Image (spheres, rainbow, N blue to C red):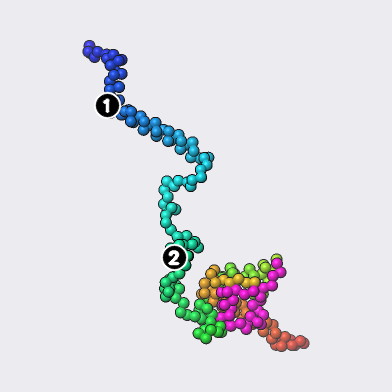
Amino acid sequence: MTARLPRRPASAKATAARRSFGEGGSFSRGGRVLGVLALASVVALSGCARGCTSSRPPIHLNPSMDNQPKVLPQTASTFFYDGASMRQPVPGTVPIGGLKEDTAFFTGKGADGQFVATIPVTVNEALLERGRQRYAIYCQPCHDARGDGKGILFQRGNVPTASFHQEKIQKYPDGQIFDVITNGTGLMSGYRWPIPPADRWAIIAYVRELERKRLASATGAAKAPADNPAGTK
């Protein structure tokens, strides 16, 4: 038979529990107070996390770079003498890719300020293909695929659009067409930003190719009756 330990009275257990609580046990009075406060905080946050209104800005638990001293574009500044937050580049600085020493290539004008007569780049099949692609994107909607000025604006709005085959434009120097693409003219807006200079020259090369083909076809059609007069076999 196994020996049984004598049972302690209930009053002894209660006394021991009270003694452990009062002597720094895991459920001391301070711990219970903190537990109550934590529970109250959780209840308060869960109740007002959604749907509650406040005049204060929202609290960012991770503000990251949202809340920091910084200058926003196009804002005023009391620090700088001119009152503007955005600063001008230091005189003489050139951004990467911003050194434009070839005036004819970047402006369509020579050293004398006049429009260059011909394209200042080598015209080859690759350039013409690039021009055809860019023309289809930027020019064809208005000037149509053949350059007759019968694009969608003319078809739906009867908006007059220049034809590349009119004598006036055929006599334009290539540099002048470059300037028109860059800065626009009349109802046409400028394409300085969407079309880089190299692509502008490619478009001009393709337009000149369209003009040459049209002139060649017209010349061939005019010669045909002379080569085969009526009544000959």
Q: What's the residue type where badge 1 is placed?
A: Glu
Residue 159, horizontal then vertical, whole percent: 69, 70
Q: Is residue 187 left or right of residue 36?
A: right
When the figure is inspected, residue 176 is found, relative to residue 48, above or below; the finding is below
* Quadrant of image for the C terminus: bottom right
* Quadrant of image for the N terminus: top left
- How many residues crowd around disc 2 within 10 Å: few (fewer than 14), some, or many (20 or more)? few
Magenta region includes residue 177 = yes
Which one is earlier in the sequence, the residue at label 2 or at label 1?
A: 1
Which range is magenta? 157-186
Residue 106, horizontal then vertical, whole percent: 51, 77
Magenta region includes residue 50 = no
Q: Which mark is residue 61?
A: none
Residue 40, horizontal then vertical, whole percent: 43, 33
Query: Residue under circle 2?
Result: 80
Query: Residue under circle 1?
Result: 23
- Image quadrant in which you'd find residue 189: bottom right
When the figure is inspected, residue 45 is found, relative to residue 13, above or below; the finding is below
| Viewer-side label of 2, 1 | 2
Q: Does residue 213 show up?
A: no
Query: Residue at the location (28% across, 16% down)?
Result: 12
Q: Secondary structure at mark 2?
A: loop
Q: Does residue 152 show up?
A: yes
Q: Pick the residue in front: 105 or 31.
A: 31
Residue 231, horizontal then vertical, whole percent: 77, 87
- How many residues crowd around disc 1 within 10 Å: few (fewer than 14), some, or many (20 or more)? few
Q: Secondary structure at mark 1?
A: loop
Query: Residue at the location (42% across, 35% down)?
Result: 41
| Residue at the farthest right position | 231
